Amino acid sequence: MRRITPARLPETLAFLMRRRALGRLGTIGALAMSQSMHAKSVGNRPPRIVSVGGALTEIVYALEAQSCLVGVDSTSSFPHQAQLLPQVGYARRLSAEGILALSPTSVLVTEEAGPPEVLRQVSNVGVPVEVLDSGYRFEGLVQRIARIGRLLSTEAKTVALIERLSLAWSEVCLSVSHHTTIRPRVLFLFAHSTSRLMASGIQTGAHAMIEYAGAINATSDFTGFKPLTPESLIAARPDVILLTEHGFKAMGERSSVLKLPGLSQTPAGRAQRIAVMDASLLLGFGPRLPMAVQQLSEQFRTSVTT
Amino acid sequence: MSFLKKPKTCVFLLFIFVLLLSILGALQKGAFPIHTEVWLSLLTGEHPLFKSSQNGDIYILWYLRIPRVMLAVLMGAALGLAGTLVQGLFRNPLADPSLLGVTTGAASAAALTIVFCSGDRIAMFGMAKIWILPIMSFLGAFLTCMTLNVSSKWLASGSISGLLLLGIALNALGVSIIGLCTYLATDEQLRNLSFWTLGSLAGANWTMVVMMWLMLVIVYVCSSRLSPRLNALSLGEVTAAHLGIVVSRLRWSISVMVALLAGLSVAFCGVIGFIGLIAPHLARAVIGADQRVLLPLSMLMGALLMLTADTIARTIVIPAEVPVGIFTALLGSPFLIVLLRTRRHRIG
Amino acid sequence: MTMLRLDAVVKKLGRHSLGPYSLCIQHNECVAIVGPNGAGKSTLLKLMSGTYRANTGRIIFNHRPLDCWTSQALSEKRAVLSQFQEFAFALPARIVIGLGRVARNTDPDHHQIVSQAAGLLGLTHHLDQTIDTLSGGELARVHLARVVAQLWDVEHGFILMDEPMAAVDPGCQDFLLETLMGFARLRKHAVIAVMHDLNHALRYFNRLVLVHPTGKLEIVTSGQEAKNALEHLFKVRLSCLKDEQGDLVMLPLRGQRQRTG
């Protein structure tokens, strides 16, 4: 892989964008680039960033620019120091005045931030709102880092981070590809409420992570999240059940997971293979993505071979 | 009679004064600190329409805080008025648009619109939203009112619990429709849907304020002309008919008004409950049951309640915000329980 | 002149069919409807007031079919006092009395009429009390005042009442009936009332309509002549007496219940 230098940054990004040509991402990327150019030209005040999204906060920390952070949302739990920053609350219910009271120079949000009117009001005041969608791809993560880097004017650290991550990523991809002989069927369960369990179809973060980890999504015949019936659970024939740590704690203990109706009729239930991972690590698509994929594939492998 | 009106006029003046004070107080509270110089410059006539961040303070005041406070006042007045009308219509002091399922009906109609009518999603949240959602919310609320009108005839006359049970049934229906929409919704639609279940005044803007104000004025004028007939309706439908009132026409008119008020409120701010229950009760305790004076005082009470609840909601966990529906429920549920206790001899 | 005419009116309530009723009420006359429980007195009154619609037959009020009258026009000519009066909210007595005139488009003398109607029925000091704080008798008077206020400025009107004295104590009953009948006479209103108390019916009303359980209506003049018909109606022997003031009084004799034929 060619060395990424600052001079070659646009070129590299264009290269990446050609490889995974997501039109929407491209538009946002172009928009972001023009906006971030503008932001760079606005005065020489140190940037004040409000970050709505755990992964975005992690990226800021990874770029060692945490001094710019003036506010985070409720999902920004890693690293732990982030929890000490002023809280702007739940991503879907932001407060315009609350964000503006922190005098930010820009607001970083993931695609699930809302309500839309509030975001519009914030940007109308003159504080740009950057929507950083990962598209659930590694390339999306690189885009996020690049854009945030531009905003924070940390080209050197950005390049270094991207390089480091790309290296780690290629190593992980190599390691995963060595084990393609065993591709377990994995079912991701998300506890929407205490009684309702949802399974993940395609076009979700969980699906992308499962595929990256060298497994097969056992429920890939629909889009998004849908409730799971015992019959569809059996029909999916999962080898491993994947849960977030939060979801696992909500169910109580291992035995209550295994008691899910229909699970005992599946290979996962019979062999009692459950994989658990912290939600922000698993679904964040932040700088810990290579590590997350590595851990996930290891969990799948160890649970399948036992 | 003129000398009798004096105490009532005093009551109104007092509450209007309290409301104005509260509005001034609420305008000064908020996450964003606004300095006195900004207030002064506003009063000396500096043009408040600058959008550039140099005049960010004035922008925030003019485009965020003032519309928000105004909308809280108008929403509270609308819900107070709707509650009084519903209580008069069903001759039931425990009726409330949210308890009877009217607001949920509006919300489920809005949810159906969001999920099934989002052809061009971007337009949905722009101009089209201004008209389609309020109209659909109104239709949902109106349909619920008519269902209540028809079903309440099957109940024993004066049965309070029967009406509330109807409300439970209609609420359950509305909630399941919203649940179905949540199931069918794409991720983007879901973001809008979660807005409905717990109402909030975030996102208030001048368009909403103007529309709300217009609708409130129209409905208030129409309802105050009908208020003597509402008084007559409290004597029972048969007696009201003997007194010369066409009861079915009156029920239709009141239902349309309640649906307009509830529909527009839900369309702009989601489901906010209990104001329609508490405001008329407080007003009745102060000024009596005569609808001619009860309607305006309920509006004042509702405005005060909503303003207080919303100001707390947006200042208690700065820089975050709590949905105001939580506070009205926290306030309203104990109120309802106390009410049930004091009226237990009349629950049938 | 006939004010109200019923022509072979039949009303079906569930499986029961009441009627056919044929009846004529003249202007300015006072008619009492008497009969045993369940005979259909209230139904007859409700047919006359327009609360019930007849299944067959015609009801003509002031030369027009009752169905053709609008609610508003009807309320300016006839007032109804039902047997059970409910209220959902505690309005002041003044407003309840005023509700008698709620359907009028213009009402310049509203307050004056309300005060006068209240004064007629001895309610002047209760006007500002809310109706949930009034006793049963006072509440009955408030509703009577409402009826009086409704037809205060009208002549040749029509008052229908279903057991108006049910909640009133014996001390007030005569006063109220006299006041009401005096008011009706002055304004030339016709009065039809379902009465449970035979003697009130005899004392204050010109004619009696006897409603038999079979559906037959028998119309008799009020007075001594009605004795046989009443005995037949109630299946009881009656004793006719004159009280200290010379008024006719009929009392059922103890243990003299006639066996049904």
Image (cartoon, rainbow, N blue to C red):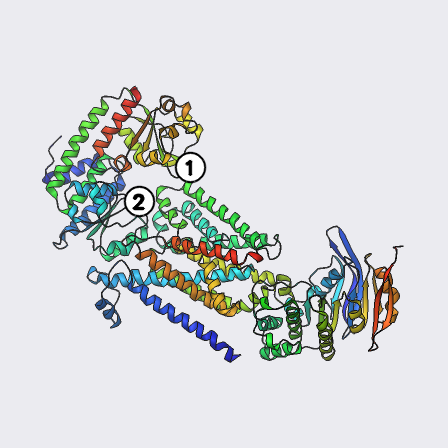
Looking at the picture, which amino acid does disc 2 mark? Glu
Looking at the picture, which amino acid does disc 1 mark? Ser
| Figure quadrant of residue C20 | bottom right
| Residue B168 screen position, x and y as percent | 51, 49
- Taking the spot 47% from the left edge, 55% from the top edge, the residue there is B138
| Residue C225 screen position, x and y as percent | 88, 70
- Taking the spot 60% from the left edge, 62% from the top edge, the residue there is B247
Relative vertical location of residue A83 with respect to residue A267 in this rendering, above or below: below
| Residue A276 screen position, x and y as percent | 30, 31
| Residue B275 visible from this viewpoint | yes
Q: Which mark is residue A195?
A: 1
Relative vertical location of residue C3 with respect to residue A296 in this rendering, above or below: below
Q: In which quarter of the image is the C terminus of chain C?
A: bottom right
Subunit ID for the residue under disc 2:
A
Q: Which of marks 1 and 2 is in front?
A: 1
Contact, CB < 8 Å: mark 1 with mark 2? no
| Distance CA(mark 1)–CA(mark 2) | 24 Å
Q: Residue A269 carries which label?
A: none
| Earlier-in-chain disc, 1 versus 2 | 2
Q: Local crowd at mark 1 within 10 Å, few (<14), some, or many (≥20)? A: few
C115 left or right of A301 in image: right
C91 left or right of B190 in image: right
Residue position for label 2: A112
Q: Nearer the viewer, residue B68 or B165?
A: B165
